[in-house]
Amino acid sequence: MKKKRVIILGSTGSVGTQVLKVIQDQRERFEVVALTGKSNLELLQKQAQVFFPKAVALADEGKAKRLRKSLKDVQVYTGEEGIIKLVKSFPADLVFSCISGKAALMPTLEAIRAGRDVALANKEAMVIAGDILMKEARKRKVKLIPVDSEQSAIFQCLGAHKTSDVRRIYLTASGGPLWNWKGDFNDVLPEEALRHPRWKMGRKVSLDSATLVNKALEVIETSRFFNIEVEKIKVLVHPQAVVHSMVEFVDGSILAQLGITDMRLPIHYALNYPERRKSHLPFLNLTDLGEIRFEPPDFERFPALRLGYQAGKEGGTFPAVFNAADEVAIEEFLKRRITFPQITQLIEAVMKEHKNSAELSLEAILQADEWARRKAYELLEDL
Ligand SMILES: NC(=O)c1ccc[n+]([C@@H]2O[C@H](COP(=O)([O-])OP(=O)(O)OC[C@H]3O[C@@H](n4cnc5c(N)ncnc54)[C@H](OP(=O)(O)O)[C@@H]3O)[C@@H](O)[C@H]2O)c1
């Protein structure tokens, strides 16, 4: 049997390392063609020694030089340009997009333009430039397979149904690290906001879960991925995090996807798609679950969710601005320069100053992203 050739962008991150774990259990089915990271030289080196890729890339130029010395038979690329060159140069059946934040946009877009099927774990690229990614994918007959657990659930529930058959999407949310926080949000420390009760993830997505920016991003991601109006997407807080999302059809039937709270499950699905293969993962024991609860989200305590809906409805360059302001705010919070509530306040302040662009080209989106970052630093002083 011919092995599926896989490129993993962001292999040193939380999702990337889990993709490699799943591949490790099915080495006979997959060949790792290339791996990339930003600056984690040691881990990338170790991964290369285990999976023998043809090429690796590190965004950090200085560290890539050291990698070149240690990995003699592997082609080493550097910088964002290097990652893009790697994606274009090496034939692959599937590119896993696991880079965090906006940095994933161009490598993901170039993977699609190169005609590679893409398993999309990164959500920001779809939020910022969903229409462009979907259009390119259609044009090149590229399959986009969602990996984010909620999107994977919706994808599986939708199956062959048309979006016009959908009445509503129920996007579930665990509530994040601070859902049950009893104190004052002004007192929240970065380490507390990073401590997710259900998922072990990278820093940005963990903090985004604490503010509910993550769920806001997912509302936009869902609408762009499945071509469904933002108004039809309802967030439900579901602390047990076993129902990964649901689709309600126009006839009143609701389909849900359940599974263990473990990213290796949607990763396994995306790797093997369109097949269903036996996995090495534990199964969900339904009788052990006890109660399954759903609660409405709290827009008062977590106003970022409202801002995300607003950005998604406005469309245009607003989602890019929402995300860029958040990326700046998170870094400032981690450096303890702003408080937890100020993350959302900064996003709101930047959004208020933004004039939407009618033109939705890649250039317009990238310009809006840059503008929002500059504006966020400017407005920091006024918080
Ligand atoms: N973690 C989860 O369980 C989970 C679940 C669903 C969706 N997601 C989504 O998946 C994406 C990745 O999340 P994660 O938790 O895996 O993040 P992470 O642990 O922070 O890993 C990010 C990866 O991207 C690389 N990277 C970061 N900035 C880069 C840049 N400028 N250029 C090139 N590479 C860069 C990192 O390299 P270094 O390690 O060298 O810094 C690392 O390999 C996010 O969009 C997130 O929302 C994550």
Image (spheres, helix red, strand yellow):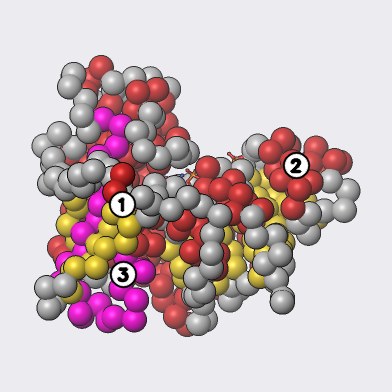
Q: Amino acid at mark 3?
A: Cys
Q: Which residues are magenta?
A: 154-178
Residue matched to label 1: 286
- Please say whether residue 287 is one of the residues in the magenta stretch: no
Residue at (70% x, 71% y) in the render = 3
User: Taking 24 as reference, is 249 left or right?
Assistant: left
Tell me residue 86's x, y (percent). 69, 60
Residue at (52% x, 81% y) in the render = 140
Residue matched to label 2: 45
Disc nearer the start of the sequence (1/3): 3
Estimate the spatial distance between the alpha carbons at disc 2 and disc 3, rounded to whole Å.
Answer: 39 Å
The response on whether ligand 1 sits within 8 Å of label 2 is no
- Please say whether residue 175 is one of the residues in the magenta stretch: yes
**Circle 1 residues within 10 Å: few <14, some 14–19, many ≥20:** few
Q: Which secondary structure, mark 3?
A: helix
Q: Are marks 2 and 3 in contact (CB under 8 Å)?
A: no
User: Taking 21 as reference, is 283 left or right?
Assistant: left
| Residue 224 visible in this rendered orientation of the protein | no
* Residue 157, numbered circle: 3
Mark 2 vs mark 3: in front: 3
Q: Which secondary structure, mark 1?
A: helix
Tell me residue 260's x, y (percent). 39, 50
